[in-house]
């Protein structure tokens, strides 16, 4: 038994070398300055520590970025695509897929008391909420008479090119929050441009009437495409729809 133990110790020493203490050094680097001075592969490498306990995750991080083409694309990939990369288990794929949803929940929760007083503030709010979504979906925020966010929610989701607005769900949620005086909706155009289609215009007009019937104003419809957005309420072509 002593001989076997000594052999194992020798193997550990041989496999150490330059990597001895590397994870501890990376964690200390993060504690001192966060991710500000780290390369994308180093950020991903650190995340992988928590699902890959005994492997060089630096090499694995490089493999992921090389495979998908960018740091962002790794998090946008599906679990099925992720597990095709050698070294990526189902647990690791699930961990990676948790990051964007957690970010969106944080963004939503941390902005609960925010006032959204302008199309620019609403546009920036929704751009963050749509990060990483590859299918088209409709989101809504419910505001009180001081423009404070009472609630935000995903109303419905479709395929990559089309989604049907669920008016009933928007009305029901607005009724759950008696202080709701205004609603802003938004939807994304994955891989497209931030301009409303004719169906977007028709749906907006109908929702204005539906909410107006219960004394609530639809104050804007934001169309998001990547980091770009269009506010229909501030567009000369559509602002009359909103009473502008």
Image (cartoon, rainbow, N blue to C red):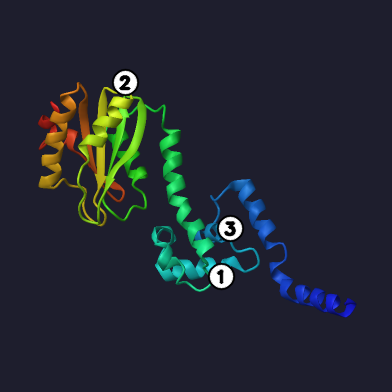
| Numbered mark located on residue 31 in the image | none
Please tell me which of labels 3 and 1 falls first in the chain: 3
* Mark 2 closeness class: few <14, some 14–19, many ≥20 residues within 10 Å: few
Q: CA–CA distance between discs 3 and 2?
A: 45 Å
Residue 81 makes an appearance in the image: yes
Q: Is residue 188 left or right of residue 35?
A: left
Question: Quarter of the image containing the C terminus?
Answer: top left
- Residue shown at the point (60%, 64%) measured from the top left: 52
Quadrant of the drawing holding the N terminus: bottom right
Q: Which residue is mark 3?
A: 46
Helix or strand or loop: what does disc 3 sit on?
helix
Looking at the rendered structure, the secondary structure element under dot 2 is loop
Residue on which the image places disc 1: 59
Q: Which residue is mark 2?
A: 178
Mark 3 vs mark 1, CA separation in Å: 12 Å
Looking at this view, is 118 or 213 the one in front? 213
Viewer-side label of 1, 2: 2
Direction from residue 126 to residue 237 in the image, left or right? left
């Amino acid at each position: 038994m002593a001989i076997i133990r000594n052999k194992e110790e020798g193997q550990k020493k041989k496999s150490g070398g330059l990597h001895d203490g590397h994870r501890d050094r990376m964690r200390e680097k993060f504690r001192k300055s966060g991710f500000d001075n780290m390369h994308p592969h180093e950020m991903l490498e650190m995340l992988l520590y928590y699902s890959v306990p005994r492997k060089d995750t630096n090499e694995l991080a490089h493999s992921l970025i090389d495979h998908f083409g960018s740091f962002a694309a790794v998090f946008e990939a599906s679990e099925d695509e992720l597990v095709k990369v050698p070294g990526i288990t189902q647990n690791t794929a699930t961990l990676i897929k948790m990051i964007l949803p957690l970010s969106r929940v944080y963004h939503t929760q941390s902005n609960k008391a925010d006032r959204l007083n302008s199309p620019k503030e609403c546009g920036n709010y929704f751009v963050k909420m749509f990060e990483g979504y590859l299918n088209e979906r409709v989101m809504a925020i419910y505001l009180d008479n001081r423009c404070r966010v009472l609630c935000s929610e995903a109303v419905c989701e479709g395929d990559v090119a089309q989604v049907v607005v669920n008016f009933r769900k928007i009305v029901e949620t607005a009724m759950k929050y008696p202080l709701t005086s205004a609603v802003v909706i938004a939807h994304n155009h994955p891989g497209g441009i931030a301009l409303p289609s004719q169906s977007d215009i028709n749906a907006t007009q109908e929702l204005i009437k539906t909410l107006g019937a219960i004394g609530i104003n639809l104050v804007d419809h934001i169309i998001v495409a990547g980091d770009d957005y269009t506010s229909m309420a501030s567009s000369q072509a559509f602002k009359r729809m909103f009473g502008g």
